[in-house]
Image (spheres, rainbow, N blue to C red):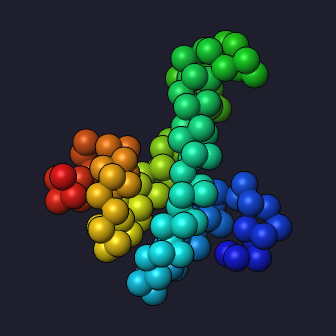
């Protein structure tokens, strides 16, 4: 994952994979640092996709729920949720309560771990 991130820092899948590995190793500082770098991109991707689905994105002026942006939106939403969960756990371990509230707020309401972090 680190090689992929060095080659392309915008590779969200590599960032998520690295975060999961760092989480498993208990490397909370490194996971949190990587997440802080990737978080704005994850949110931007989600906002761009949401706008495309609403037909507001400049590259997709006629986007609808039945077009490619919808499928991409599901993927981007999953990525954001994965990152939010890792971020919440890392922030919890490090005692970074403000960061934790940001990550928990980004979780979907039906996420089973969201009530725990609240």
Q: Nearer the viewer, residue 34 or 97?
A: 97
The image quadrant of residue 72 is top right
| Image quarter of the N terminus | bottom right
Front one among 100 and 57 = 100
User: On screen, 58 above or below 93?
Assistant: above
| 66 shown above or below 77 | above
Q: Nearer the viewer, residue 77 or 43?
A: 43
Q: What x and y, as percent, mark residue 66?
A: 56, 24
- Occupied quadrant, residue 84: bottom left
Q: Residue furthest bottom?
A: 25
Image coordinates for residue 5, horizontal then vertical, percent: 73, 68
For the point 73% across and 17% down, which residue is it?
A: 58
Residue at the right extreme of this rendering: 7
| Residue 85 shows in the view | no
| Left or right of 3 on screen, residue 34 | left
Q: Nearer the viewer, residue 48 or 29?
A: 29
Number of residue marks = 0
Residue at position x 41%, y 65% in the image: 86
Compared with 97, 75 (above or below) is above
Q: Residue at x 33, y 52 (%)?
A: 98
Identity of the residue drawn at 70% across and 13% down: 61
Q: Position of residue 28 (x, y in %)?
A: 43, 76
On the question of residue 14 being in view, the answer is yes
Q: Is residue 87 above or below residue 62?
A: below
């Amino acid at each position: 994952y680190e090689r992929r991130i060095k080659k392309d820092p915008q590779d969200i899948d590599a960032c998520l994979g690295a975060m999961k590995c760092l989480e498993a190793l208990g490397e909370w500082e490194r996971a949190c640092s990587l997440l802080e770098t990737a978080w704005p991109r994850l949110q931007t991707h989600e906002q761009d996709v949401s706008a495309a689905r609403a037909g507001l994105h400049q590259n997709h002026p006629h986007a609808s729920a039945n077009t490619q942006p919808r499928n991409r939106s599901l993927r981007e939403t999953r990525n954001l949720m994965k990152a939010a969960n890792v971020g919440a756990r890392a922030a919890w371990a490090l005692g970074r309560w403000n960061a934790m509230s940001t990550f928990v707020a980004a979780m979907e309401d039906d996420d089973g771990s969201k009530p725990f972090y609240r």
